Amino acid sequence: MPPPSTPARAPGTWDVIVVGAGPAGATAARVAAENGCETLLLERAAIPRYKTCGGGLIGASLAALPPGLPLNVFDTAHRFTFTLGGRRERTRTSASPTCAMVFRSELDAALTEAAAAAGATVRDSTALAHLDQRGDTVTVRTNGGESLRTRVLIGADGSAGRVARHVGVRCAQVDLALEVEAPVDERTAERWRGRALFEWGPLPGSFGWVFPKGDVCTAGVVAARGNPAAIRAYKDDFLKRHDLLGPRPLHDTGHLTRCRHPDSPLARGRVLVAGDAAALLDHWSREGISYALRSGAFAGRAAAAVLAATTEKEVEAATEAYGRRIDEVLGAEMRASATLMDLFARNPALVHGALTRLPPAWHRLDAYIAGRTDVAGIMTSPLGRAAVALGNLLPGPRRPVP
């Protein structure tokens, strides 16, 4: 429902301000603008900007993109190679290839342009320095000293951002991902074309990946934070074994990935969080783009509902509805992925064997990549329940499942 008509807004006053122009923020800004909200999108970096990310769009991500979004797809993976610590290699072929390989800088820029086309005002190179929430107004101060006021603030400024801290987001799992974008020669590019690799690594819950993008491969590793030296050693070994440890990567970066605790808040008053700022991420694969796109759309619609509210009780009802929607859709997927992560961390050989030796297991994962099912659908299937039952009989330390 669009907000009721209001007099012309005063300078520096907005219906909705969104902080962060990644997939969650750009989507939230677009959806809020489409619902009649005067929307401002703030991004601290200059657009386009680099973002550490594998850049693989699974079916759920592709389905959540705005129709007709212009996007460069550099490859589409139709083969997936799985290894266990570099051994027991097996390649499976997708029934319906949908994993599109993109660069996040281009994806985010395209989504930001879509937000602008919908009517949102975009300001890049503008960081949030402070926020204060009083009554029905949220006041933010930028790094340039400008003071802005809004009736709804959406934080999509990352898991370590100011808005997440204001809301009080809490995490159940924090990992360190290290990644390079490595230029490759024509022969290497041909070897990887159409094929993505996942290697179950030597550290608990770790894996490495290679995503092909023409004359560049995006590759990296992820594991629980706490031993960065071991993770860096794993990254170097992984890249060396796959001939990707070149002298001049285009980018060589790292970042923390965070998965929210199921009781973590998603709103505080008129301030909402979405995407990484809400720590919405798959526990096992650490895939976050589909979560960002979907939560951003939910947040944009929730902002319009808050603006349409005439009492604080209705405002509270709108933000509570946002939280329920997140929990029903994305929370259910995260709980299932936490169960899978527990199984994988205790016995990666079991997961590897199932994916490479049991056709039904691969078909389920293939359906997930294509967007025909989600992790909850996998883990509640007879095969998923059997895997969990078997895993519970195996020795090994258990992760607490949220």
Image (cartoon, rainbow, N blue to C red):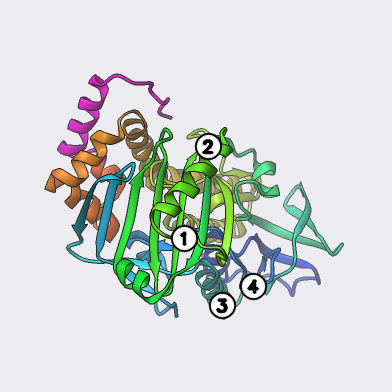
Alpha carbons under labels 3 and 1: distance apart:
15 Å
- Label ID, residue 230: 2
Which mark is first along the chain, 1 or 4? 4
Q: Is residue 43 left or right of residue 251?
A: right
CB of mark 2 within 8 Å of CB of mark 4? no
Give SS at disc 1. helix
Which mark is first along the chain, 2 or 3? 3
Q: Nearer the viewer, mark 4 or mark 3?
A: 4
**The C terminus is located in which quarter?**
top left
Q: Is residue 57 left or right of residue 255?
A: left
Which mark is first along the chain, 1 or 3? 3
- Label ID, residue 47: 4
Q: The magenta stretch spans which residues?
A: 379-402
Q: Nearer the viewer, mark 4 or mark 1?
A: 4
Residue type indicated by callout 2: Ala
Quarter of the rendering containing residue 357 = top left
Residue 273, visible in the rendered structure: yes
Residue type indicated by callout 4: Ile
CB of mark 3 within 8 Å of CB of mark 1? no
Residue type indicated by callout 1: Leu
Q: Residues within 10 Å of mark 4 (few under 14, many from 20)?
A: some
Alpha carbons under labels 2 and 1: distance apart:
33 Å
Instruction: Classify 123 as above or below 204.
Output: below
Identify the residue position indicated by label 1 in the image: 293
Give SS at disc 4. loop
Q: Residues within 10 Å of mark 1 (few under 14, many from 20)?
A: many
